[in-house]
Amino acid sequence: MRPGLAAAAAIITVVTGFHAAIWYSVRPEVHAPSVTERFSSLSFAPYSRDVRHPDKGPPVTAEQIRADVNAVADYTRAIRTYSSTMGLELIPAIAAERGLKVTVGAWIDKDEARNEKEIRAAVELSKRNPNVEGLVIGNETIFRGEKSAAEMAELIRKVKRETSTPVTTGEIWNVWLDHPELVSASDYIAAHILPYWEGVSAEQVVDRSIDIYNRLRAAYPGKRIVIAEFGWPSAGFNRDGAVPGELAQANVIRTFTARAEAMGIEYNIIEAFDAPWKSFEGSVGQYWGVFDANRHLKFPLTGPIVPNTFNQTAILALLLGLVFSLPMLRASQTVTVSQGAVLAAAANGVGAWVALVFNHWATHYVTGGNYVTLLLSLVLLVPLVIVLLYRIEELAAVAFGPAPKRLVEARPAATLSRYPKVSIHIPAYREPPEMLKQTLDAVARLDYPNLECVVALNNTPDPAMVEPIRAH
């Protein structure tokens, strides 16, 4: 049955409603413990999203630092830095304006001149700012192989002689277990526990982290232990069982925070802000922030957790589905009901696909070569959508459309006085005789009075392949 314009509009409406119901049914929602208090601490790197690398740009300004401190001040009790130069030496004084404690970091690598400059700046900050509660000399320097544990222990002892502020270094948890001499030299253990890099699933990460913390407590009873880095990325590549995601990040951080607060564990979440400049860490390095690069909180700290862009993506998918369905209204007199339903469903499916493509780019940072990928994907998306919808329309017409109408009506057989000669040629080269026999039998069953069939056996000298056909 062919629908009219009203029926076609009704089909589009019904399919669009079904499409909306699908979006509603798949709307993800996660429930996790609420963060009722401010975070214990957040890693703080006040770089704008336009910075390519902190070492290659101008020093951070006081205005940028103050804006970023104000962004996090209502959500954390303290912040941790990783360097004390290039403008970052301004952080403790500005953080004090909002009542925030600061753990000051000194970046340590193979550049000894820079190391000395970093240490001098960090020590000076600890003396001038009463809100500085710790110095972290180096960040995973042993893990990167740029200093040995013995060298870092000696460096820590040197800094401790110059300040009364507690001094340590930031290292992966197993480095602390492997090097008791580092523990002895440090005022406290600053352990990085990031199970994502171990391929641990989001469902197991909190239990895994607490277990590691307890192992450190058992190994060094009485020693102060701080989980100096804990976090989960909201996007990027999977690492074995570790799957990044917006909901996973929110669930992991909220669950861990609740457990840590209940157990009295000191912790620092990595990190405050997404860092698009960390593209050198692969696709995952940019997405560890509790805030996005525009300083917007990425997930609610209380109540249900849903993706921030889910509703917008669903609305865009529905609108695109309607737009892609509109051509069916023009052809409403030539399509069947089933054909119209298929076309409307295909239009909505393509609309959902395009909306998800746009959502991917809207929720990821475009840096470097990604600009080329983005441009090409958008340019190629238009013809791809057109071709896809056109091919679906052809398939729907064949499978569900009205029966084709002959353009030239056949005349009754009785009116023909002479039938034109039809000659069917069957070329063959070393073909199995039985297959050729079946082909000839099929031709012989054709109901036409003036028909001949010519079998051309080309370059087939084997009589076993020729004579059976001749005899047949």
Image: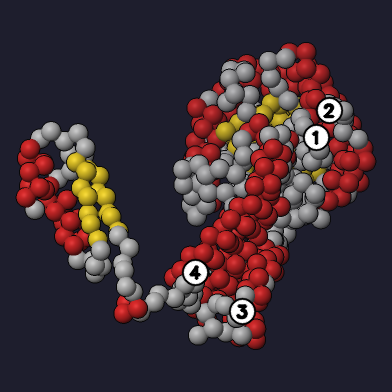
Vertical arrangement, residue 331 with respect to residue 147, above or below:
below
User: Amino acid under label 2?
Assistant: Gly
Task: Point out the frontmost of discs 1 and 3.
Answer: 3
- Tag 2 and tag 4, C-beta contact below 8 Å: no
Q: Position of residue 288 (x, y in %)?
A: 66, 45
Residue drawn 25% across the image and 44% down it: 427
Residue bearing mark 2 = 57
Task: Point out the frontmost of discs 2 and 4.
Answer: 4
Residue bearing mark 3 = 332
Q: Position of residue 130 (x, y in %)?
A: 86, 38
Q: Crowding near pointer 4: few (<14 within 10 Å), some, many (20+)?
A: many
Residue drawn 17% across the image and 50% down it: 436
Q: Position of residue 88 (x, y in %)?
A: 84, 32
Give the CA separation, mark 1 to mark 3: 54 Å
User: Mark 4 or mark 1, which has the lower sequence index?
Assistant: 1
Considering the numbered disc 3 on the image, is that residue within a helix, a strand or a loop?
Answer: loop
Give the CA separation, mark 2 to mark 4: 57 Å
Residue bearing mark 1 = 51
Residues 142 and 6: in front is 6
User: Mark 2 or mark 3, which has the lower sequence index?
Assistant: 2
Q: Is residue 201 left or right of residue 423?
A: right
Residue 132: which quarter of the image?
top right
User: Amino acid under label 4?
Assistant: Ala
Q: Crowding near pointer 2: few (<14 within 10 Å), some, many (20+)?
A: few
Considering the numbered disc 2 on the image, is that residue within a helix, a strand or a loop?
Answer: loop
Residues 203 and 452: in front is 452
Residue drawn 69% across the image and 61% down it: 309
Task: Point out the frontmost of discs 4 and 1.
Answer: 4
